[in-house]
Image (cartoon, rainbow, N blue to C red):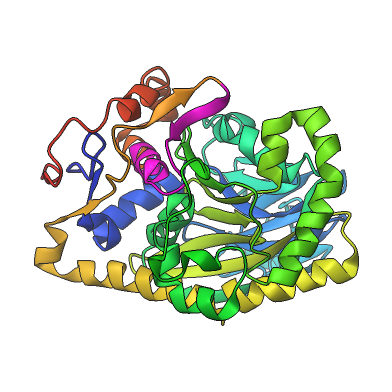
Amino acid sequence: MKPLIDVQRGLQSARIYHDRDVFDAEMERIFARCWLFLTHEAAIPNPGDFVTARMGQDEVIVVRQKDKSIKAFLNVCRHRGARVCPVEAGNARSFVCNYHGWSYGTDGALTSVPFEKELYKGRLDKSTHGLREVARVSSYHGFVYGCFDAAAPSLTDYLGDARWYLDIWMEANGGVELLGPPSRSMVHCNWKAPSENFVGDAYHVGWTHAAALKAGGGMLAPMSGNAGLPPEGAGLQVTTRYGHGLGILYDTNPGSHDMPLAQEILAWQAKKRPAIEKAYGALRARYYGSHINGSVFPNTTYLWGSNLFKVWQPHGPNRTECFTWAIVEKDMPTELKQRIADSMHRTFGVAGYWEADDNDNMESESQLSRGYMTRQGSLNAQMGIGGDREDPELPGVVGESAIGETSYRGYFRFYQETMNAATWADMKKGDAGWKRELTEAGSGLIGEPVAA
């Protein structure tokens, strides 16, 4: 495949938003090899509990086993390929295909075939016709991920340096849960458009959401209409080995842009911060009370402070299904959890006014790339290029301000690596030099196109 990403100049080919060949390669090179979010453990607490999920364009059943472990299987009957489980969630002792009645246990084994003796006459080996199992399933602080590639690094290693930042809100506060079921919507955009936005785009907030900020108030309201930038030292950006990245705006909690709720959340956090500081240090305790936008490569995004967790599931080059949950701390009062969820869905749910603002942008940048001439151009992620650095206190590569595109560049640096590599062993060779690719970027001419 022709080069799509110019790491040194911070440019990406516009083909990444529309090209069908690129999309098909992503399904093979990224979604069939990387760790993908499946569910939260709280959604399947008991044996037999299950949810259906997507891994790229493959549908899977995620089910709690009798021994309390979790397995995932392709939601595809081994007879003629029909869907086995037609519902999103529940509890089951078996899964029965509606087409011909083949029945599978929650462990994926084929247990029953109608008229097996009469029609197959002993020639069907049921032991080889169980549901196809996802090679790896693992949980990190209750967040369950799956991976089709048995040769992939462990989930812990895949998250890598990003764990230092994820632990701030996934573990340090006593743990979180996702309130579901998730809201679902179909957005006519490429799956990367929202994933890249959440990984590091604070630049759009004051302009895209100007009306919402002005009307809704909250701690980000002073940014409305690009009235001003956050002051110097107000935050930073980070990118890590496998493309996971985040941005932090210090000492801020929009509370999904509801000032009374934000103040209540900050008061709740203030009570926990001394214990967090003692266990995790002053820096991470401060981050706990800050706003964090981030993505776990390739398609999981979150806003800590705006209290949302999203997965962007690709259905095609310009068609993406969005799943949205509210993030709440486990030990919060039920009433506060519900207020957080209600506020989050007003802003970032299916009909959320911030969500609508964002979707307009995601759809236009994706759909316009259908144009032949548009596809010959490049996308610019050069903000802050030349200023990325290593920091003795912080894992990963760090950008110098709250608004920049460090995390974009890191996201697409790994995107290119995994699109070009034949195996995970090939990607392992890049461990030593990935930081240097970013910290030494910026030497080229601004605007020079990606190589064709």
24 displayed left or right of 95 = left
Q: Is residue 407 magenta?
A: yes
Q: Which quadrant is the C terminus positioned in?
A: top left
At which x and y percent is residue 144? 69, 48
Please give the name of the residue rendered at 41% of the width and 66% of the height, measured from the top-left corner.
227
Number of residue marks: 0
Which quarter of the picture shows residue 450?
A: top left
Please give the name of the residue rendered at 78% of the width and 39% of the height, measured from the top-left corner.
172
At which x and y percent is residue 246? 52, 45
Of residues 264 and 18, the one drawn nearer to the viewer in this rendering: 264
328 displayed left or right of 352 = right
**Res. 276 visible in picture:** yes
Q: Is residue 107 magenta?
A: no
Please give the name of the residue rendered at 30% of the width and 46% of the height, measured from the top-left corner.
383
Of residues 122 and 435, the one drawn nearer to the viewer in this rendering: 435
In the current view of this chain or complex, which residue is farthest to the top? 432
The span picked out in magenta is: 393-414
**Res. 182 visible in picture:** no
Q: Which quadrant is the N terminus positioned in?
A: top left
At which x and y percent is residue 52? 66, 64
At which x and y percent is residue 386? 29, 32
Q: In this view, does 181 lie above or below 131?
A: below
Please give the name of the residue rendered at 28% of the width and 25% of the height, measured from the top-left corner.
440
Q: Is residue 260 above or below residue 377?
A: below
Of residues 355 and 52, the one drawn nearer to the viewer in this rendering: 355
